[in-house]
Image (cartoon, coloured by chain):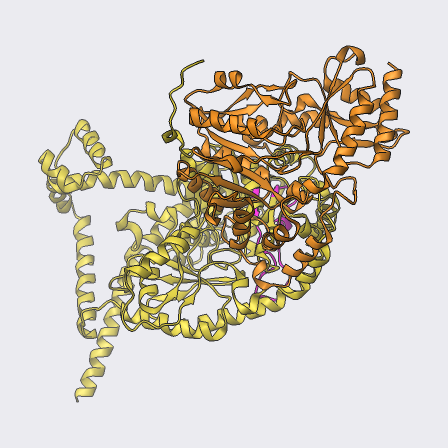
Chain colours: A orange, B yellow
Amino acid sequence: MIKASEFLLSQNQALLANFSELKADPNHAKPMIQFMKGDPTEFGHEHCKMSQIGYDIVKSEIPKSQNHSYCHSTGTQPAKQAVAKHFGHGKNITENDVIITQGVNQGLFYCLLGICDPGQNILVPEIGFPFFDGIAQAYQVEVRKYKLQSDNNWQIDFEDLNSKLDANTKFLYVINPSNPCGSVFSKEHVQGIINWANQNHVLIVADEIYYGMSFGEFVSFGELADEGPIICLGGMDKIFFTPGWQVSWMIFYDKNHYADAIKQAMFNLCQLLLHANVFVMNSLPQILDQLTIFYARDRMLHFKENHDFLLQELNQIRGFKCIPAQGTIYLAVLIDLEVFKVKNDAEFAKKLLLDQNVMLLPLSWNGTDKYQGIRMLTIATKDVYIELIARLKEFVSRL
Amino acid sequence: MQQVERSWDMLKPSARAQVSLNPIRNWVEHVVPQVEKEGKKEGRPDKKIVFLLGDPTAYPKFQTPNEYKEIVANSVGKIDGYTDFFGDFNVRTQLAEVLSSHHRKLEADDIILASGGSGALFYATLALAKPGDKILMPRPTFPLVKAFADFYGIQVVFYDLNPGTWQVNIIELEYIYEQNPDIKFILVNSPSNPMGSELSPIALKEIVNFCERHYLPIVSDEIYENMIFEKREFKFISDYTKTVPVLRCSGLTKKCLVPGWRLGWLALYGEGDTFKQVKQALRNISNILLMPNTICQAALCQVYKKSLDIIPEKMEELHARYKALHHGLHDAYGISVGETKGAMYSTLIINTEEFSDINSSIDFARKLQQEQNVLVFPGELFYGEKFVRLVICCDLEIIEEACLRIKQFCLDHKKQYLHYNLKSVIFQLIIIILFLQTAKHYMDSKTFKSHRSKRYEKITILERAMIIQMKENGATCKEISDALKKNIKTIQSIKSIEKRSEYGNLKKALVEFGYYWVIQNKHFNVENTRKLAKNLNRLIKEQLTSKTSKFQHLIPDHKKQSSKRRIIQQIVESIIQRVLASKHLQETLETTNQEKIIPKEEEPDDQNKEFLDIGQLKVLQMFYAYTQFIQQSIQQNDLKN
């Protein structure tokens, strides 16, 4: 056996080991219900799908010969211009402020590599998509968890945030709307965060992959950007229900040019892994024009319906307590360990899987040990949820 | 609240991301415009001829075939969501089937889809090497893996390819391995960017054997797989081994003329659970960067299969271009076209000594742009020297036009020699040879030795250490001799002692290599030393001929030309002695009933032709020169009469 590099072996290892422990019984009497991946297309619901218009746009770009060539490593000009136009929010954003990445993950990867040196730290929400948890250590960057208030729409606790900040802090990572909480910050709270960052001279990296996916109001960090620099990450991934296409973006809102050197560093990094798929990138201008940036927001009704149904049903089952979401495709459900006679949510997930062949993501796998629960997805069809509730009820009754 | 001193000035990028990472993009984006600004020569042709970026679709004849476009258009809407981060299971299953060879059956698990060939190389590099580790790379090379390595603080050790043929110098590999036994993998790239060369089956076998001896995995960059001029089946390095683990990195990019798709893969060829840990590492990184675009994934296998039909006709086009280039420049001054067997590149080998004002390939590239409006990449971008890379995808007429311009350019920079007439040159030669011959006799005599000792002054051990130290600090011999008040010869001699010891290492390495070579090649009739010597002689000679070879650098200048044969002879004799004394061999000999060893004195006379000693060689040269001289003077006399 060849020895692999410890550098890669150490990355994400804990998280993936967790996943490999969740093994289903292939001979289970009941068919599997699985809610692991945050992939809105998984259940093939007609409302959670790219529009035919979008497909036709891509098909119309394919015959053009220039759409199969290499392009600038930060993306094609039309794509960058389109992103600048639709997400500029009147902040004078040009194509030079935009990088097209292959998925938002790549943008996060570049933020870590391009901004942080060994020994520095980043502020990451305690409970949130655990991208940095698995890999920052390999780059000798410390991940500092700041508190979100579960009883206050998962808003940031500034007092706690202050205590985590020091001279070596490189950026504040926020996820809004949030995976896995489904929370959406109010305009006041976004403004509050920006004010805090300006006061403390902290760069904000805002993960807005669920841009606009709110049941009500949504305000982008880009919209309120003023004094200090903000990097917003977004993509076609969720807002057009095409995570597989791997066309996402990174926008620099930085009117005072405080982060120009960082932007240049990102350009350099792009030369390593190069650009995204060209014909999809060049479809982006038309897709954004025709389907608008609110394509997903306009289809939130479906998720809201499921969200409300789950909220109502789950809260009635002993041991479950939902924390209502304001958007996205997620719903955080806390569990009472004593009721289920388990020592943590991972054990709960295993037990549920064995008993009912239902696979759910433990909340503690989202970079926290404070919250014990599961992340529900609101992407499936009603019949799946009716079946799910029945199985959960059966599970509880057997305890 | 804790007081924290912070300001916007603290917003700095990480140290490693501050340098431009890709020399090739840097040349195109910065140097070319800069050179243009610095001034073009008057009368420069208006039409720009660009041989720069390796994007075939930038040229009319190599645009994405409609067949591929149709396939991919039909894939739109098939997969929108996440696939496995390794790539869609069905796609991997199909690809595994396509990539299975006669002796290795691949499964979906052995395939990892990535973002282009560069993504695959990124994965492979990081999966095998961590910061601080060493990896072995060819030189010249496509600089991407070097960029990854630099970024992550992985140390790169180069092995030089023989200029022109671009084959592997296996003895140098052995030598490098001996110096760096902690190497994590060897990178192989065939057909090659930037040279358009292909490694011969012998070279591939030698690499495989080398890796087998040292348990070294191979990372094979096969982005140009199947792209060869010859009409035959393409052989992969994994075809030559069942035991050496090979990570084959490839993609649709070049062979299917779709660089914009960004679809590549990594295929793992290895026995049993060879790759168990590596797969784990790859799973980790693909969880970070996710899978490549799913529309293209869905089209992958169909396009790949289709390409097997389309590639040969495209290669015929490329071959025609190479032939035109070769023909167009066969009589060019000071340059030659490197051997090209595939991919879409060719090289011009530059003999800088023949030019008056061109000292490097960077010089060549810049001046060619300024004077002839022909844009090429200098070899330095590929960590090589004295060559430039050409992308040969442009139309034939353009290549013909470029050849004319390049030829003119070479003539414009031709070095001007003083004109001797032939007669005087030969006469001087004879004088020199005669002088050398006398000097040799003189050297042999004792009088010379006593004379010589006067020229070198005695130095103490302390002084010697001091001189070495000063030399290491970059002081010239002249400076040291002034400082220490010793004559300069003495100072120079210290250097030569050092060189001699390096040279001793070289000989040792060669002997070691030759010994293993004999042991490995069991079919040799070891008892027949004459035949063995002949083979060894050829082997060692091959290793010493390469000009850029690391070994070559170690040979002291005064030994370089004249006594090569003697060096080789010494080495060969040492190897044979070692082989004959080897216990390992004695054991195998006992079981086989081979011929007796032929004693040296009974060897046939023609043996001497193989090992002509230096004295005999000089006498022959002198005799030859003398007869030439006589013949010519007779001819001239005849003419006069």
The residue nearer to you, when weighing B46 against B639, is B46
In the rendered image of this protein, does residue A160 appear above or below residue B295? Answer: above
- Residue reaching furthest bottom? B641
Chain part drawn in magenta: B218-246
**A67 sits left or right of A325 in the view:** left
The residue shown at (88%, 25%) is A390
**B27 sits left or right of B591 in the view:** left
The residue nearer to you, when weighing B153 against B257, is B257
Query: In which quarter of the view is residue B33 placed?
Result: bottom left
**B337 sits left or right of B248 in the view:** left
The residue shown at (34%, 69%) is B372
In the rendered image of this protein, does residue B320 appear above or below residue B545? Answer: below
Question: What's the magenta bit mostly, secondary-structure-wise?
Answer: loop
The residue nearer to you, when weighing B506 against A126, is A126
Residue A143 % position (x, y):
53, 23
Quadrant in the picture for the C terminus of chain A: top right
In the rendered image of this protein, does residue A134 appear above or below residue B245? Answer: above
Residue B399 % position (x, y):
45, 72
The residue shown at (54%, 68%) is B318
Let me know if residue B259 is in the magenta part.
no
- Residue reaching furthest top? A338
Residue B623 % position (x, y):
26, 67
Query: In which quarter of the view is residue B459 placed?
Result: top left
Residue B640 % position (x, y):
17, 87
Quadrant in the picture for the N terminus of chain A: top right
Let me know if residue B236 is in the magenta part.
yes
In the rendered image of this protein, does residue B346 appear above or below residue A346? Answer: below
Q: How many marks?
A: 0
- Residue reaching furthest right? A29
Q: Is residue A363 visible?
A: yes
Q: Is residue B576 visible?
A: no
